Amino acid sequence: MTIAVQPNAPRGADLLAALPLAARGTPVAYLDATRRTLRALMERPDLLDGLTLERRPGGYARNLLFGGGGISVWAMVWSPGARTSVHDHHCSCCFGVWRGAIREVWFRPISESEAVATADATRPQGYVACMMPTGPNLHQIVNPGAEEAISIHVYGFDHAVHASSVHREYRVVAA
Ligand SMILES: [Fe+2]
């Protein structure tokens, strides 16, 4: 297994480096380990000290923090008004809100290209969630606030193999 900690690794890189081993266990054990890791990282205000983060005004930027063993970890920087497409995932997806707050909208697919909204919640700083591709995992993330938000995402994909965690994108239709 190749473990590639980035040259400008975040504080807590040792915690991230343990995730590939956890990923070789059962899905339940992996999600437990990842949830614990993310909760610990959310408690670290110095997590991204010394790193140069990419930012995209009006959108969001992904910053690779760790990649290896089938896991990639990203710091997502959300400008005010940034939003993802409505999408599901081909891999496990865990995230924690490290700074600011984000809004997460959940959807139910009605075909391979259309979905209806089912739930909508604001996720405050410290919030951690995990989902598997086998469960409900169709959502959209938005930064509705006037301040930048940053979230840390742990995905079960190899960044050298897949461009992103997105499986399909959906068009939203009225319920
Ligand atoms: Fe997602």
Image (spheres, grey):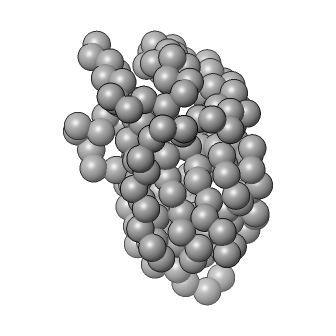
Viewer-side residue, 161 vs 64: 64
Q: Is residue 119 left or right of residue 2?
A: right
The answer to whether any part of residue 92 appears in the image is no
Residue found at the far bottom of this picture: 174
Q: Please say if 136 is above or below 14.
A: below
Query: Looking at the figure, which quarter contains the C terminus?
Result: bottom right
The quadrant of the rendering that contains the N terminus is top left
Q: Which residue: 27% across, 44% down?
A: 162
Which residue is most to the left?
161
On the image, the x and y values in percent for residue 138 come to 55, 59
Question: x and y percent of residue 110 in the render?
Answer: 52, 71
Image location (x, y in percent) of residue 20: 43, 19
The residue at 61%/86% (across/down) is 174
Instruction: From the viewer's side, name the closer residue of 90 and 10.
Output: 10
Res 156 → quadrant: top left
Residue 20's place in the image compared with 56, above or below, is above
